[in-house]
Amino acid sequence: MIETEKTLSANFKPEKTAIEPKKGNDQLVKGLLYTGMAVLAIVCLVPFLMMLVNATRSNDDILTGFTLVPGASLIENYKTMMDYVNVWTGFKNSLFISVTVTILSGYFSALTAYGFAFYTFKGKNFLFVIMLVMMMVPGQLGLIGFYELSKTLGILDTYIPLIVPAVASPFVVFFLRQYILTTLHPSLIEAARIDGASEFKIFHIVALPIMMPAVATMSIFTFIGSWNNYIMPLVLIFSPEKYTLPVLMGFLKGSQVAQNLGSMYLGIAISVVPIMVAFFFLSKYIINSISAGAIKE
């Protein structure tokens, strides 16, 4: 009896119940997804290509219809644009303001977020609630009051009111605080303190490198927002040589150059280039910021 049971158990082979994946269907789905993403990428790129191509065409050529073949009127459009507006002065002013705001906002917002995340002090929760409320209030509502304040302080027609208020953005602070709470363990800070590191050294050596993906991500949006800022420079700046590029583009649209569509497209193309360059070099940090903490060993 025992030998019979051994023989049966040796000859018994369980049936395979696992369902093998259908490789053909998977390949078809991947092909459709890749095709759809390629179509979306082309649809997104076409307007930029049209802008660059129309910057090289004459006004009559643009009115004839759509084409992706460059024209021969680039130099003429550039001369027409420069006769009315010195675009490069506005480019320099916008670049100075945007880079300064981005650097200062990234550093001081990270410092503020680190303080909210790992320090306990009186009124911490109250200040954090105020910061959340400020995130929900549009900046345009305080434009008149901010203008009067800048007038009282004597900083009108300067870049100070365009740079200083953006140093610690509530949204950037909130984002960085949530990021560092999920990526930096308090034990690292305690270990650094035991080793004798000062609080500022802990921030610069331990916290800031860990926060860099999030800082870079927010720097993209800070740079774009500062570069495209139109209403604040228009209200606070009076000297033409201090105008930013968006303000000059607004004047260009209201001048006779607006009848020359090629010059308008050229001015817009020049104003878009820094945004594309900044996004090209910093976009990889967006993925690192989103995926941080998603995989734990």
Image (cartoon, helix red, strand yellow):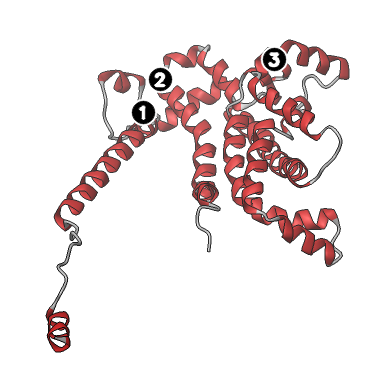
Residue that carries the numbered disc 2 in the rendered image: 261
Q: Secondary structure at mark 3?
A: helix
In this view of the protein, can residue 1 be seen by the observer? yes
Where residue 126 appears, x then y in whole percent?
Answer: 78, 28
Q: Quadrant of the N terminus?
A: bottom left
Instruction: From this view, report whether residue 127 is shown above or below residue 195.
Output: above
Residue that carries the numbered disc 3 in the rendered image: 235
Q: Residue at x 60, y 46 (%)?
A: 214
Picture quadrant where residue 169 is located: top right
Where residue 32 appears, x then y in whole percent?
Answer: 21, 44
Q: Residue at x 26, y 19 (%)?
A: 64
- Per the model, the C-alpha gap separating discs 1 and 3 is 32 Å
- Per the model, the C-alpha gap separating discs 2 and 3 is 27 Å
Give the mark, 2 or 3, whose residue is nearer the N terminus.
3
Picture quadrant where residue 48 is located: top left
In this view of the protein, can residue 238 be seen by the observer? no
Q: Residue at x 59, y 50 (%)?
A: 213
Picture quadrant where residue 166 is located: top right
Q: Residues within 10 Å of mark 2 (few under 14, many from 20)?
A: many
Q: Nearer the viewer, residue 189 or 228?
A: 189
Q: Amino acid at mark 3?
A: Val
Mark closer to the observer (2, 3):
3
Question: Which mark is on residue 54?
Answer: 1
Give the mark, 2 or 1, whose residue is nearer the N terminus.
1
Mark closer to the observer (1, 3):
3
Question: Which mark is on residue 203?
Answer: none
